[in-house]
Amino acid sequence: MTHRHIHRLRVAFGDCDPAQIVFYANYFKWFDTAALEFFRACGVPSWRELEASRGIIGAPLVNASARFVSPASYGDDLDVETSVADWRRTSFVMKHTIRRGDTLIVEGEETRVFAMHDTEVAGRIKAIAIPADLRALCERP
Amino acid sequence: MTHRHIHRLRVAFGDCDPAQIVFYANYFKWFDTAALEFFRACGVPSWRELEASRGIIGAPLVNASARFVSPASYGDDLDVETSVADWRRTSFVMKHTIRRGDTLIVEGEETRVFAMHDTEVAGRIKAIAIPADLRALCERP
Amino acid sequence: MTHRHIHRLRVAFGDCDPAQIVFYANYFKWFDTAALEFFRACGVPSWRELEASRGIIGAPLVNASARFVSPASYGDDLDVETSVADWRRTSFVMKHTIRRGDTLIVEGEETRVFAMHDTEVAGRIKAIAIPADLRALCERP
Amino acid sequence: MTHRHIHRLRVAFGDCDPAQIVFYANYFKWFDTAALEFFRACGVPSWRELEASRGIIGAPLVNASARFVSPASYGDDLDVETSVADWRRTSFVMKHTIRRGDTLIVEGEETRVFAMHDTEVAGRIKAIAIPADLRALCERP
């Protein structure tokens, strides 16, 4: 089981490019925002709190992909539906579906890890095993 | 055969997030910049000129993906190496490899089409068959 | 008299920089978003419709300024209060006040004009006299 | 006396908005980039190094303003000329002039302070007196 969370946003003028449609990198920004809103809705503490309490600096990306189905433009209200599609040992896959009403706009996936600063190499981060308590928070229906 | 183009950029402070590393959506922005610089280096006219002369408004995305191998941070000089990996009837695949010196940072692909405004549905765009002359420009060694 | 409009937004992780606070250029992006939401709330048609019906492509900036009073970070809910502080012949001044609860975060002003494409010089835009009907829409209490 | 530094950038497609011109908040992003390139050219250590060695987390903004003189669009090469126009006790004023060839595009100012984390209030930062050595680096001709 996994939680599903809907994050609503309105496309701003500055999110669009000279082709009058959303500049595509912004969809990945919104995936990231939706991912954080998903964690927040599940009761996962903010990265700020997790870094202070447990050294977990966040959930950086291993890979990300998106399929762009229909264009959107400024003034559109978009719903980003987010869930965790797969839990692995050190990584997990978040699925995002963006719709405007019933129209599918973008589908995407992010593979993420929970990360800490690497104490052996300054400036490096490393993945940790998925913390069971954080996973449990995300799996509550 | 295909052209290879290297686009160099320096990571700015504002490109990085509270984890001190590049906010991941920016890599897709840089893929797009590198794609345009690739076309420019090949002699493809700007979208502005192509829209005026032939109604081609650009090369919007069908899908995009990236694999994040090592983090980068502000002040880093990154090289984005871009080529066209595959030409299909109406779409083509651009491959981008981002390195800092010899260190692989990110690998990604974009599938794009050449698009015009749809004359039958206001606000819609549609893919056209790859224009042979634009493809030929990109295939010159 | 002038309308007042409140635009609420939540600061995203990707809006913040390595100092853990909102990267300052984003406040100007939010001024722009709040300006458009102000116009929308007043009943001003979208730039898309105004360009199609009257050739008005939008309300570009003449100048902009901001005073940064307190930092904000991701997860914060911010209210942007927007009004038109001054109407001149061809320009007008929008005032934006951003607060988190009772805490003042940022104050700013934008001077804007309504613009059309310049029919005499390709690629140039020019300011027009403030359209009386658009001003009237913004002045309704 | 003060140093002058020129930062060159090429406007990307994704920097522009549906009016086909640079989305205005990006000029402030480029002011920030030019400010950091100015410091780097003067020999000021990176914020990363200054935070590690002296607790100085950067040079956040007190206020910023810009006057938009001519529009620019994607493909344009812009030069940002940066200098420190005024040194005060805890703040300093950076001046940025953006040109495309001989054409003035944007003029702006940023008032900044050097900041440290406030040890008394978690999550707050505070300005410090301008470090004499950092100022001296910026004043070398």
Image: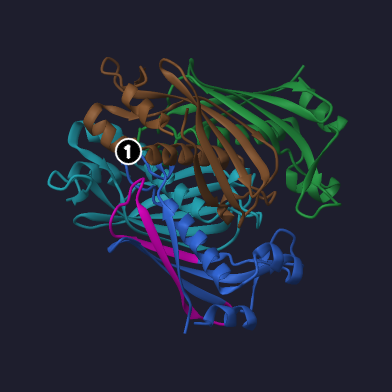
Chain colours: A brown, B green, C blue, D cyan
Q: Is residue C74 magenta?
A: yes
Residue found 39% across the figure and 47% down from its top: C23
Which image quadrant is residue D131 in? top left
x, y percent for residue D15? 57, 47
Q: Is residue D53 above or below residue D95?
A: above
Picture coordinates of residue D49, whole percent (x, y): 27, 31
Is residue C109 shown above or below A88?
Answer: below
Query: What count of labels does the image hold?
Result: 1
User: Magenta stretch: residue D135 in it?
Assistant: no
- Amino acid type, label 1: Ser
- Segment colored magenta: C63-90
Q: Residue at x 44, y 38 (%)?
A: A38
Q: Quadrant of residue A112?
A: top left
- Is residue D24 shown left or right of residue D139? right
Residue C120 visible (yes or no): no
Image coordinates for residue A120, horizontal then vertical, percent: 27, 14
Residue designated by label 1: A46
Observer-nearest residue: A73 or C16?
A: A73
Residue C133 in the image: x percent, y percent?
64, 81
Report whether residue C11 is seen: yes
**Looking at the picture, does residue B41 appear above or below residue C5?**
above
Query: How busy is the neighbourhood of tag 1: few (under 14 within 10 Å), some, or many (20 plus)?
Result: some
Secondary structure of the residue carrying tag 1 is loop
Observer-nearest of C125 and C30:
C30
What's the residue at 68%, 52% (across, down)? A20
